[in-house]
Structure formats: C-alpha cells, structure tokens
Image: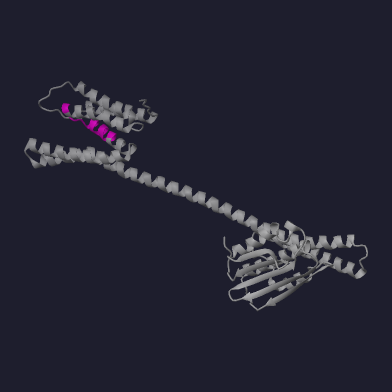
Amino acid sequence: MRFTTTRQDVLLAVAAFGAGVVLLLAHGYSTWPELDLVPGWRLLPLAGLCFAMLFRRTRPIVGLLLSTPFNFADVVIGPSIATLMIYSDALYAASLYGPKRAAEWLLGITTAATLAVAAAVGVALATISGGVIAGSLAGVAWVGPVLTAMVVRGHRDRADMERQRAAQMARLAEMDRWAAVNAERARMARELHDVIANHLSAVALHSSAVLKVSDLDRESINRSMEVIRENSVQGLAEMRRMIGLLREGDGEADPAAAPRLDGLERLVAHTARTDLTAGLKVIGDAPGLPAPVEHAAYRIVQESLTNALKHAASGRVEVLLEHRPGCVVVTVDSPLGTGGSRLPGSGSGLIGMRERATMLDGTFEAGPEDGRWRVYAELPLTDKERP
C-alpha cells in the first residue's frame, strides 16, 4: 500500500514532537511507583505517535492503528500530557476524515474504554472519587475528540449538501432560461411568419396577376395596385411595431401590436384574387375576450387566408367565427386546390396554427372535407398561455 502525506501534516508532526519534548523537559508526565525508567525512554512513544500523525489526513485509520500501541506503551510507562493530546488528535482525525461508520464504532469503543478505566481505577484505589476522576479524564481525552469530530463532520456534510443543492438550482435555472429563450424564439418565428406571409403573399399574387394577364382593364389594375399598396403599408407597420417591442423588451408596451378580432372584416375584405373572393360570418357576441385567445384566433384566420391565396382553386373562401359558451371556434373553408401534397396548411403555417391552439389547450384540425379544405380551431376562453 502506498502512503502519501501532505506538507501540512509533516509540519504538524514536527511541531507536535517539539512541543512534546518541551513538555517532557518540564516534567509533564507521571511515573508509576513500581517503574524506575530513564526519562529518555519516553521519547520512543512520543516519536511513534508523531510519526503516525503523518497519515492523519490521508490515511486516518492507519494513523490511529499506529498510534494506539504507542499510546498504550506510554500509559504503561506513565501517562504524559503530550502523548495524551497527540492520541486525542488521532481519534479526532480518524473520526473526521475516515469512513462515517468508523466514527460510530470509535464512539462505542472509546465510551466502553472510558467506563472500563473508571471502574478499574475505582477498584484499584478502593474509592469512588478516584474512579470518577479517572473516567472524566479518559472521557475528555477519548470520547470528546470523537464527538467533536462527528459534530464537525455533520456540519461539513450539510454544507456539501447545500452546495450541491445550490449547483442543482443553478442548473435548473439555466435550463429554465434556455426553455424560455427557445419558447420566445418560437413565438417570434410564428409572429414573423404570420405577418410576412400574409402581406407578402397578397403582394406577390396581385403583382403577378398584373404582369401576366395582358388584357386586364384599368379597374382591375387599380384594384390590384390598391391591394398591393394596402398590404405593403400594413406589413411595414406591423414589422415596425414588432421591432419596437423587441427593442423595448416589453410585450405590453404597444397594444396595437396585438391584432384584434374586430380587424377580421378588413383582413377578409383584402383577401382576394381575380378568381377568388372571401367572406366573413360572425355568430354570437363575446366582448372582452382574453388577449391570448383573440390573438390566436386572428392569426389562425390570417394564416388560413394566406394559404387560400397561395393554393386554393377558384371560388370563395368562407370564414366563420363562432362565440360559444366557454370557447371561440374558427372555421375557414376554401376551395380545394390541385397541388396534391402542396395543399393549404402543408407547410410551416400549419405548424404555427397548431402551436397557437395547443398553447391555449385548444384543438386544431386541418384537411380536405367534402371537396374543400377546412381549417377548424377551437380555443377555450383562458386568460393565459401555457408555458
């Protein structure tokens, strides 16, 4: 087995040996009457105990096992103050730095040894007071260091647990921060998609019609240019509002940035192609809707109309807004296109609409039905979005 020591333990052992020699020179020891030894013999147990101190931190149990026979030898010669203090330190180190189970065993052993010493001295001197004094000294030298080490170890373990808990809380806080950042990125992506896709799709479709159809009359050209201008202005306005909110970092700074359902009529009126029209029907009345519900309903209608402009066949788009008890229902029916997998809702717009409904614990469906493409969303009247 390879033993290692620390510089601190080496210095402590040297200091203990020097202090022990001083105490021996000052006659800090007792001698049994039956023994008449040269004082120099006391240096042997002192040196052995100091050597064992080299392992007090790195191999505390080994250090205690080495110290015990030297301490016993010192007691046989005649107990001294120096060896008693060094052996107490060995008990303390073994209880603090050794296995936790070892400290519990040492407490039982030292308690039993203290009682045995008290009984033996009491019987030998035939006096109770002598036994009590001997037991008290043994308890202070043996049991005291073990109990002190157990208390210190308890505080150290609790401090380690608190540090680990603090580290875990820091990791959880970092995970929550990243989750919040990702959720905000997803929300921004949905908003940007809805704003840009709707207005730019209308601009692209009407400008393409003006360029490709050569026999358009002046009225049709004017109507297309009005739609292009209207969508360009609205798109720029919404982009400015969103950029302003991002700079300010306050989602409530500008209420106009959140579209409202009373703007659906205008939105539907500007959704048109030369071969496609749109209409809005509202059933029921529910003033004071929660802002998240109103926002989600508007964006779902907006995205559905955008997809209809891009993919629907000629005909009419029907938008139905129903105010039911406890929920708002949005239904958008558009003529089914002929693009196969490129039907309305096949891209990121469908994902964004589904996310908006899911965050409000609502339901969302999109797909062909009775020869038309139907978008159906049911939004409960809740006043806050799910994180």
**Residue at the (30%, 35%) spot, across then down:** 94
**How many numbered discs sit on the rendered protein?**
0
Residue reaching furthest to the bottom: 284
Query: Magenta region: which residues?
Result: 76-90
* Image coloring type: one colour
Where residue 203 sits in the image (x, y, percent)? Answer: 81, 62
Residue 379: x and y, percent? 61, 69
Residue 354 position within the rendered picture, expressed as x and y whole percent measured from the top left: 64, 61
Of residues 255 and 187, which is closer to you in this image? 187
Horizontal side of 119 relative to 177 (left or right) equals left
Image quadrant occupied by the N terminus = top left
Q: Position of residue 85 (x, y in %)?
A: 25, 34
Residue 81 is drawn in which quadrant? top left
132, above or below 249, in the image: above
- Whether residue 137 is visible to the viewer of this picture, yes or no, is no
Taking the image as shown, residue 72 lies to the left or right of residue 124, namely: right
Left or right placement of residue 314 versus residue 257 in this view: right
Main secondary structure along the magenta-highlighted residues: helix
Q: Quadrant of residue 273?
A: bottom right
Picture quarter with the C terminus: bottom right
Residue 219 seen in this snapshot: yes
Instruction: Decide which of 255, 139 is in the foreground and name it.
Output: 255
255 to the left or right of 144: right
Q: In the figure, residue 348 lies in which quadrant?
A: bottom right
